[in-house]
Amino acid sequence: MPEADEDFTERTISFRASLGQRLPVETSAHLLLIHVENAASRHVPLHLLPLIVGRSAPAEVVLAGSTVSRRHCRLEQQGDSILLTDLGSTNGTFINSERVTAPIVLQDGALITIGAHALSYHRRSQQELAGWEALERELGEASDYVLSVLPPPITTGPVQAEWFYQPCTRLGGDAFGYQMLDSRCFAAYMLDVAGHGAGAALFAVTVANVLRQRMLPEVDFRDPGAVIRGLNRMFPMERHNNLFFTMWYGVYDVTERVVAYATAGHHPAYLVATGTTQAVPLGTRNPSIGIGADRDVAAARAQVAPGSSLFLFSDGVFEFTDNEGREWGLSQMPSLLPTMTGPNGPRRLYDTVRMTARPGPLEDDFSALAIRFV
């Protein structure tokens, strides 16, 4: 179980020169990838073995954070394979989500969890390794582009907004955004493309750019129902590689203090009034975008009290398994979200989920957006 006060975004690894006699591995294409949030994975070639992974020297691979023991596990050569042994670590070493109880030979592609850190083991020829590194660079550029599409926080004015985004792979299928449509109407949305990886990410960015530039023909972007209908016309799944997406879209009228909203296959957003302990769901029942013909869209409106906060999020925020093996769901959110109002709410929500979830990466993309109505 993770120890208290752990910063789960701290992903840093240091290496020191090995001491004493080491046995060379026959090929330099044995390597560890240490996965870093919102950045390229770090490569650790396994040239010299054995080596220790731990929280501090004399470990050769140092992983920061209190969920990592000082001497956590050991990697050594066994014939032409790599053997991993847990060294009695407090929080355990996991291979493909199974706790290591005895020395184990690593298979190509094995997923390794060490405290809050996610690693993987790979064995490649030198030619394959060079191609893989080129692909990693390209994925890094794609990830940077996805982040560039997301809006900057808003810290002043009648409507303020901040967010936290963490895909479960290098490229995720979530997107969100917000903007003033005119002097009194503020629009915000959250969308989640079915699936993960490059295809879902490219599709999500395409939809986000359509919304950001208001490129739906003959659509009043102040009307949530019209926006949902326009997206259905533009993105039928049979013309987009069978991809579809869920969405929450809302427009807040600054003068009337009313939010109009519609959802398409997405769970509700939640409105939290000042001083309350339960969040109020804001959602309507409509099919996901892309799977049905143009049809009427159910929309609704809600009054917004001064100081209220509105939370939009993807299902990766609440669909996970906790440290005790229990499945979380949307039912936990109404009582949790009121504790996340105020500065850095989306980031605090992520930290809470990360400390509650079982060790290892989250199972789905995490996207959370908090809007505060002054």
Image (spheres, grey):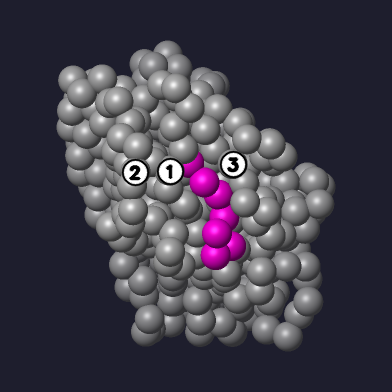
Answer with mark 1 or mark 2, whichever residue precedes in sequence.
Answer: 2
Q: Position of residue 162 (x, y in %)?
A: 44, 70
Q: Are marks 1 and 2 in contact (CB under 8 Å)?
A: yes
Other residues around mark 3 within 10 Å, as few (<14) / some (14–19) / many (≥20): some
Other residues around mark 1 within 10 Å, as few (<14) / some (14–19) / many (≥20): many
| Residue at image coords 42%, 14% | 238
Q: Position of residue 101 (x, y in %)?
A: 72, 39
Which amino acid type is marked by label 1? Answer: Pro
Pick the front one: 155 or 184? 155
Residue 240 part of the magenta segment: no
Other residues around mark 2 within 10 Å, as few (<14) / some (14–19) / many (≥20): few
Distance from Cα at disc 3 to Cα at disc 2: 17 Å
Answer with mark 3 or mark 2, whichever residue precedes in sequence.
Answer: 2
* In this picture, residue 326 sits left or right of residue 343: right
Pick the front one: 345 or 114? 114
| Residue at image coords 57%, 55% | 72
Distance from Cα at disc 3 to Cα at disc 1: 11 Å
Answer with mark 3 or mark 1, whichever residue precedes in sequence.
Answer: 1
Q: Please give the residue where the numbered disc 2 appears in the rendered image.
A: 22
Q: Are marks 3 and 1 in contact (CB under 8 Å)?
A: no
Q: Which stretch is magenta?
A: 69-75
Q: Is residue 306 above or below residue 229?
A: below
Q: Nearer the viewer, mark 1 or mark 2?
A: 2
Which amino acid type is marked by label 3? Answer: Thr
Which amino acid type is marked by label 2? Answer: Arg
Residue 70 part of the magenta segment: yes
Q: Which mark is residue 85?
A: 3
Q: Position of residue 56 (x, y in %)?
A: 46, 67
Q: Which mark is residue 341?
A: none
Count of numbered circles in the view: 3
